[in-house]
Image: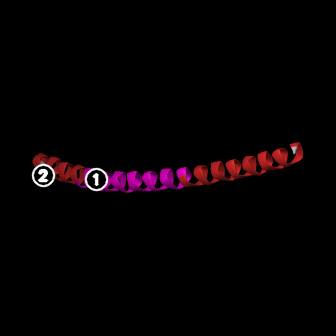
Amino acid sequence: MRNETLEKSLSESRNEKGELKARLAELEKSLHHYRNRNSDIELRASLSKIEEMKRRVEQLEAALQ
């Protein structure tokens, strides 16, 4: 009886471990996706700032002429 209980517990633990590994893989994939998305957003914001600075430089150059 005790062996059966221990075997059942071991089997349940193994199943749970498999489920946790699958969930971990899913979360890692999601994290990678959001990191890439955040990088894209940051790059777009930087590009916008660069374009704004370029326009300002052009305005200043025009004012100096």
Q: Which mark is residue 16?
A: 1
Q: Which image quarter is the C terminus in?
A: top right
Q: Secondary structure at mark 1?
A: helix
State the extent of the magenta-drawn residues as a range: 15-39
Closer to the camera in the image, 34 or 11:
34
What is the residue that sits farthest to the front in this orientation? 65
The front one of 51 and 44 is: 51
In this rendered view, identify the residue nearer to me: 17 or 13.
17
Tell me where residue 58 appears, x and y as whole percent.
78, 49
Q: Is residue 29 magenta?
A: yes
Marks 2 and 1, how far apart at CA: 18 Å
Label 1 neighbour load within 10 Å: few <14, some 14-19, many 20+: few
Mark 2 or mark 1, earlier in chain: 2
Check the image and name the residue furthest to the top.
64
* Figure quadrant of residue 57: top right
Which amino acid lies under the numbered mark 2 shown in the image of this protein?
Glu
Tell me if residue 9 is in the magenta stretch: no
Question: Where does residue 17 sit, x and y in percent of width and height?
Answer: 26, 50
Residue drawn at x 68%, y 48% as measured from the top left: 50
What secondary structure do most residues of the magenta stretch adopt? helix
User: On the image, numbered disc 2 is attached to which residue?
Assistant: 4
47 on left or right of 8: right
Q: Amino acid at mark 1?
A: Glu
Q: Measuring 77% from the left and 51% from the top, which residue is drawn there?
A: 55
Secondary element at tag 2: helix
Q: Is residue 57 left or right of residue 34?
A: right
